[in-house]
Structures are given as C-alpha cells and as structure tokens.
Image (cartoon, grey):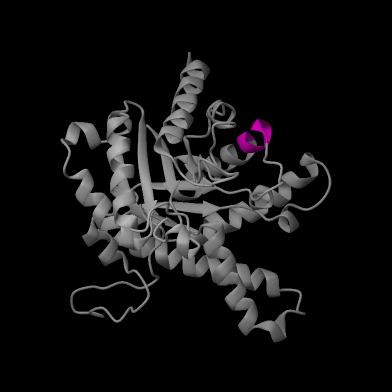
Amino acid sequence: MQEIFINLKRFDVPKILGGLCPVENPKYWIEKIIDESVELGIGSLESINVTYLLPEALIIPAIERLSAYPEKQTSNISIGCQGVYRENIKPGGNFGAFTTNLPAAAAKNMGCTWSMIGHSEERKDKLSIIERYESYNKGRQDFTQRAAQAVDSLINQEILCALDMGVNVLLCIGETAKERGNGGFEEQKPRIQKVLKAQLARGLQGVEKYIHNNHVAIGYEPIWAIGPGKTPPGAEYISFVSSYIKKAVNGKYGFDPTVVYGGGLKEENAAMISGVDTVGGGLVALTRFTGDIGFEVKDLKKIINKYIHAKHNSLS
C-alpha cells in the first residue's frame, strides 16, 4: 500500500482571522472535507491509504463524520494529529498536567491512528528555542551539532510516546541548504547522508520493541527546496535519498520503512515522484498555492490519480 498524508496545518483558523479555513466555523469545513473525500471514493481506494493530519480542534469532528459512513467507504481514510508531547499520561503516573500540550494518550483516545513528528516547522521551532537559551555557546564549534542532538532527542521522546500508545508515526527528516553545502550532487551526497543518518539514528532510538505492532513511515523533507521560488529536487535526488533512508533504517533497526516525499506532493510532480520505486507515497499540504491559496478534495483526487497512474505504469 502507498501512503498519502495531508497536513492541514492551520485550517482550524478562518481566513477572517488570518488562517486558511474558508468558512467561519472550521468544524463545518472539516466535515465537508470528509464528505467530499468519501463521495470521491478516496476512502475505498485499492492501493492507497490517505491520512489527514489535523490540528487538535478538528480531530473529533472529522472522526465523528467518518463514523457516519459505512466502513467499506472509509476504510482507507485515517485521521492523525500533527504531533504529540514528549511525555505522556499513564495510569499511576501524571494524570494530565500537560496544559497546552497534546499527550499521546489524548490523541489515541480521540481516535488518531497516526502522528506526524519532526516536521521541519517543528524542528525549526525547537532549534530556535535551544539557540535562544544557549546563545552564549554559539561561538563554540560543537554548538550546531549539540543543538541538533538536543532536537532529535526531544523528537525521539515524542516518537516513543506515540508508539507506546499504539499510534503510528510519520517521522520527518531532511537537510538544510547549509547542511547540504555547495558543489555538485556527487560532492553533496556524503554530507546529505551524514545528516539523514544522524537524524534517523537519534530519532528512532528504541523503536525496536514497537515496530512489530506499529507502522513507522519516514517523510523526506528537502528543507532547502521548500518555499516560494525554490527549485525542488528531481527524480535522481529523491531516488538517492529514499534508497539511502530505506537502507539505513533496515540495517540499523531491521525493518523496511515506507518513505514518502515530504517536500510537497502536487499535481505537477506526482507522476515523477511516483516513478521512484523506493518512494511509497507523499505528503500534501495545500492544493492551491497562488491566488486564493487553500485545499480542495477534488484537487487531492487529481494528485492521487496521477500518482496511481504513474505507479501502475512504472510497475507494468
């Protein structure tokens, strides 16, 4: 099965308040998204699982809406959250002193089956906090390495909390422009591998005891290519990275992860990405990037159709 994840970022905030939701009540919007997904057959695709990664406020209305349909129409649609906290609620432990944070127990209880962890926006936020409080050390040569280790350590704790609750994990990793460095692709390859190897080793530490009962997918985000005016990587680059990720995880942890392209799966690149045999899906954010930016289920279906068609052609 291929895995398509949709990160619906801040669609819990209406446009009149600066967010992306086109209606004032986001509850009605996510219900409409679920309705359209079912009507367009996204929940009954033979070869693709589709997971909506939602802000906390949209999780319960999405799950309730899904439950209103027969299972055969929704079996391939899952609901997930955009992250969990690094500590969790357990019987006999902390009963819930996690104000402003989403513990994995709450995500599981709401019905989430997936959690995205380590998204580039999360990594950037964690790194900025570490840099702020260790600014006096920034001149030291090992500061960048220690800061990256600290971020990965926090992400690892989140991963283990999710897996411990039976929530599958989409771990996002990727290199920045500085980490990739200058020069041609052949010169950059060992630097790219070094970054990804470290993120995987530190982020996945301790997952071995959970992997037989849970799924861990890896989302590759080429951070240097994300944003307006940036040139995304081509098939050769994505093939190199996804092959390395699968090899590194299999060699160290003994399982073959699904690797999804997290730099933004779009209608324009769906066929190219699908043609990379070591890629098993993608991460979608928006479906409209200019003008009235937003997300439309009919456009998601176009992306999925192009992806499926190209994948079938590559395998035939």
Would you say 6 lies left or right of 56 here? Answer: right
Residue 254 in view, yes or no? no
Would you say 288 lies left or right of 214 here? Answer: right
Q: Picture quarter containing residue 99?
A: bottom left
Would you say 16 lies left or right of 57 here? Answer: right
Q: Is residue 246 above or below residue 273?
A: below
Give me the residue at 27% from left, 50% from top. Answer: 62
Q: Residue furthest top?
A: 316
Where residue 247 appears, as percent x and y from the top left, is 54, 41
Q: Is residue 14 above or below residue 37?
A: below
Q: Main secondary structure of the magenta part?
A: helix
Where residue 19 appears, as percent x and y from the top left, is 48, 60
Q: Is residue 195 above or below residue 103?
A: above
Where, quadrant-wise, is the N terminus in this rendering? top left
Residue 209 magenta-drawn? no
Q: Residue furthest right?
A: 183
Residue 238 magenta-drawn? yes
Residue 193 in view, yes or no? yes
Q: Picture quarter containing residue 59?
A: bottom left
Would you say 236 lies left or right of 3 here? Answer: right
Give me the residue at 51% from left, 53% from top. Answer: 172
The residue stretch that appears in magenta: 234-239
